[in-house]
Amino acid sequence: MEIVQIDFFEIEENDEYKKIIQKVVQTCFETEKLMNTNLYLNVILTNPETIRATNKHYREIDKETDVLSFPMFQKEEIEGLIKKKENIVTDILGDVVISIPRVYEQAEEYNHSFERELSYMVVHGFYHLMGYDHMEEEEKKIMRQKEENVLQKLNITR
Protein backbone atom coordinates (compact mmCIF):
# COMPACT_ATOMS: atom_id res chain seq x y z
CA MET A 1 0.00 0.00 0.00
CA GLU A 2 1.21 3.49 -0.81
CA ILE A 3 1.63 5.61 2.31
CA VAL A 4 1.57 8.91 0.43
CA GLN A 5 -0.51 10.27 -2.39
CA ILE A 6 0.96 13.36 -4.07
CA ASP A 7 -1.23 15.71 -6.07
CA PHE A 8 -0.15 18.72 -8.09
CA PHE A 9 -2.73 21.51 -8.26
CA GLU A 10 -2.09 24.57 -10.43
CA ILE A 11 1.63 23.76 -10.65
CA GLU A 12 3.66 21.50 -12.91
CA GLU A 13 4.35 17.90 -11.85
CA ASN A 14 7.90 17.32 -10.70
CA ASP A 15 9.59 13.97 -10.00
CA GLU A 16 12.20 15.54 -7.69
CA TYR A 17 9.43 16.81 -5.38
CA LYS A 18 7.82 13.35 -5.39
CA LYS A 19 11.08 11.60 -4.43
CA ILE A 20 11.73 13.99 -1.56
CA ILE A 21 8.18 13.70 -0.22
CA GLN A 22 8.08 9.89 -0.47
CA LYS A 23 11.37 9.57 1.41
CA VAL A 24 10.27 12.01 4.13
CA VAL A 25 6.82 10.45 4.63
CA GLN A 26 8.37 6.96 4.79
CA THR A 27 10.68 8.14 7.60
CA CYS A 28 7.81 9.90 9.42
CA PHE A 29 5.65 6.76 9.27
CA GLU A 30 8.52 4.53 10.46
CA THR A 31 9.42 6.93 13.28
CA GLU A 32 5.84 7.12 14.55
CA LYS A 33 5.12 3.40 14.02
CA LEU A 34 2.39 3.93 11.43
CA MET A 35 3.63 1.36 8.90
CA ASN A 36 1.06 -1.28 9.88
CA THR A 37 -1.97 0.98 10.24
CA ASN A 38 -3.18 1.19 6.61
CA LEU A 39 -3.14 4.97 6.94
CA TYR A 40 -1.84 7.17 4.17
CA LEU A 41 -1.03 10.84 3.77
CA ASN A 42 -2.28 13.09 1.00
CA VAL A 43 0.16 15.85 0.00
CA ILE A 44 -1.10 18.58 -2.31
CA LEU A 45 1.50 20.81 -3.93
CA THR A 46 0.18 24.12 -5.16
CA ASN A 47 0.74 27.86 -5.57
CA PRO A 48 0.29 30.85 -3.22
CA GLU A 49 -3.11 31.84 -4.65
CA THR A 50 -4.60 28.40 -4.10
CA ILE A 51 -3.22 28.03 -0.59
CA ARG A 52 -4.58 31.49 0.31
CA ALA A 53 -8.05 30.58 -1.03
CA THR A 54 -7.91 27.26 0.85
CA ASN A 55 -6.88 29.01 4.06
CA LYS A 56 -9.72 31.51 3.67
CA HIS A 57 -12.33 28.85 2.85
CA TYR A 58 -11.50 26.33 5.57
CA ARG A 59 -9.95 28.46 8.31
CA GLU A 60 -11.49 31.88 7.57
CA ILE A 61 -7.99 33.38 7.42
CA ASP A 62 -7.50 35.46 4.28
CA LYS A 63 -3.75 35.05 4.16
CA GLU A 64 -1.20 33.08 2.19
CA THR A 65 0.86 30.59 4.15
CA ASP A 66 3.51 27.99 3.40
CA VAL A 67 1.81 24.80 4.63
CA LEU A 68 -1.68 23.81 5.79
CA SER A 69 -2.66 20.58 7.53
CA PHE A 70 -6.09 19.04 7.71
CA PRO A 71 -6.11 16.07 10.13
CA MET A 72 -8.73 13.36 9.98
CA PHE A 73 -8.15 11.99 13.50
CA GLN A 74 -7.62 13.27 17.02
CA LYS A 75 -4.23 12.55 18.60
CA GLU A 76 -5.77 9.93 20.92
CA GLU A 77 -7.41 8.12 17.99
CA ILE A 78 -4.05 7.81 16.19
CA GLU A 79 -2.39 6.52 19.36
CA GLY A 80 -5.16 3.91 19.60
CA LEU A 81 -4.60 2.78 16.00
CA ILE A 82 -0.87 2.37 16.64
CA LYS A 83 -1.43 0.39 19.86
CA LYS A 84 -3.92 -1.99 18.23
CA LYS A 85 -1.33 -2.96 15.61
CA GLU A 86 -4.10 -4.39 13.50
CA ASN A 87 -4.91 -3.39 9.98
CA ILE A 88 -7.80 -1.01 9.77
CA VAL A 89 -9.62 -0.16 6.60
CA THR A 90 -7.36 2.03 4.50
CA ASP A 91 -7.94 5.58 5.62
CA ILE A 92 -6.37 8.97 5.17
CA LEU A 93 -4.34 10.41 8.02
CA GLY A 94 -5.04 13.84 6.55
CA ASP A 95 -4.09 16.39 3.92
CA VAL A 96 -0.96 18.52 3.85
CA VAL A 97 -1.11 21.43 1.40
CA ILE A 98 2.23 23.04 0.50
CA SER A 99 2.97 26.18 -1.51
CA ILE A 100 5.94 25.27 -3.71
CA PRO A 101 6.86 28.92 -4.49
CA ARG A 102 7.02 29.55 -0.73
CA VAL A 103 9.34 26.55 -0.35
CA TYR A 104 11.75 28.19 -2.80
CA GLU A 105 11.42 31.63 -1.13
CA GLN A 106 11.97 30.28 2.38
CA ALA A 107 14.86 28.05 1.33
CA GLU A 108 16.60 31.18 0.05
CA GLU A 109 15.54 33.30 3.03
CA TYR A 110 16.83 30.75 5.58
CA ASN A 111 19.83 29.79 3.44
CA HIS A 112 18.65 26.16 3.21
CA SER A 113 18.51 23.83 0.27
CA PHE A 114 15.16 23.36 -1.46
CA GLU A 115 15.22 19.72 -0.28
CA ARG A 116 15.64 20.76 3.36
CA GLU A 117 12.82 23.30 3.22
CA LEU A 118 10.37 20.98 1.44
CA SER A 119 11.29 18.15 3.82
CA TYR A 120 10.70 20.41 6.79
CA MET A 121 7.27 21.46 5.52
CA VAL A 122 6.25 17.84 4.97
CA VAL A 123 7.45 16.83 8.45
CA HIS A 124 5.81 19.90 10.00
CA GLY A 125 2.50 19.16 8.29
CA PHE A 126 2.75 15.49 9.24
CA TYR A 127 3.13 16.29 12.94
CA HIS A 128 0.13 18.61 12.82
CA LEU A 129 -1.82 15.63 11.44
CA MET A 130 -0.50 13.57 14.35
CA GLY A 131 -2.06 16.07 16.77
CA TYR A 132 0.96 18.20 17.65
CA ASP A 133 0.93 21.98 17.68
CA HIS A 134 3.19 24.93 18.39
CA MET A 135 0.87 27.50 19.96
CA GLU A 136 2.17 26.98 23.50
CA GLU A 137 5.90 27.01 24.19
CA GLU A 138 5.93 23.50 25.72
CA GLU A 139 3.97 22.04 22.76
CA LYS A 140 6.28 23.84 20.35
CA LYS A 141 9.34 22.34 22.03
CA ILE A 142 7.94 18.79 21.71
CA MET A 143 6.91 19.30 18.09
CA ARG A 144 10.27 20.80 17.10
CA GLN A 145 12.16 17.89 18.72
CA LYS A 146 10.06 15.41 16.75
CA GLU A 147 10.60 17.35 13.51
CA GLU A 148 14.36 17.58 14.04
CA ASN A 149 14.55 13.87 14.90
CA VAL A 150 13.02 12.92 11.52
CA LEU A 151 15.20 15.40 9.62
CA GLN A 152 18.32 14.03 11.36
CA LYS A 153 17.34 10.47 10.40
CA LEU A 154 17.18 11.70 6.81
CA ASN A 155 20.53 13.45 7.27
CA ILE A 156 18.92 16.74 6.35
CA THR A 157 20.42 19.46 8.49
CA ARG A 158 20.32 23.25 8.53
Image: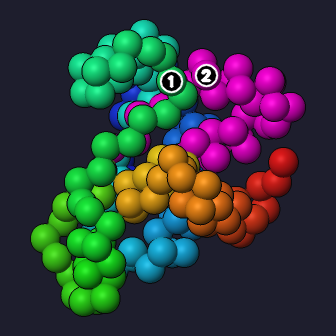
Question: Is residue 149 located in the magenta-colored stretch of the structure?
Answer: no
How many circles with numbers are drawn on the protein? 2
SS label for mark 2: helix
Left/right placement of residue 95 relative to residue 140 reads left
As drawn, the residue found furthest toward the top would be 49
Q: Amino acid at mark 2?
A: Arg
Q: Are marks 1 and 2 in contact (CB under 8 Å)?
A: yes
Q: What is the quadrant of residue 82 in the picture?
A: bottom left
Which residues, given as a range, are shown in magenta? 95-123
Colour style of the rendered protein structure? rainbow
**Residue name at image x 82 percent, y 36 percent:** 112
Towards the viewer: 140 or 58:
140
Q: Amino acid at mark 1?
A: Thr
**Residue name at image x 60 percent, y 18 percent:** 101
Q: Is residue 74 above or below residue 110?
A: below
**Residue name at image x 54 percent, y 28 percent:** 66
Question: Is residue 111 located in the magenta-colored stretch of the structure?
Answer: yes
Q: What is the quadrant of residue 8 in the picture?
A: top left
Residue 81: % across, % down: 26, 79
SS label for mark 1: loop
**Residue name at image x 32 percent, y 78 percent:** 79
Residue highlighted by disc 1: 65
Residue 29: % across, % down: 46, 69
Residue 48: % across, % down: 49, 14
Please tell me how crowded label 2 is: few (under 14), some (14-19), or many (20+) other residues with Cα within 10 Å.
some
Q: Inspect this view and state whether residue 50 appears.
A: no
Q: Which mark is residue 78?
A: none
Left/right placement of residue 95 relative to residue 118 reads left
Residue highlighted by disc 2: 102
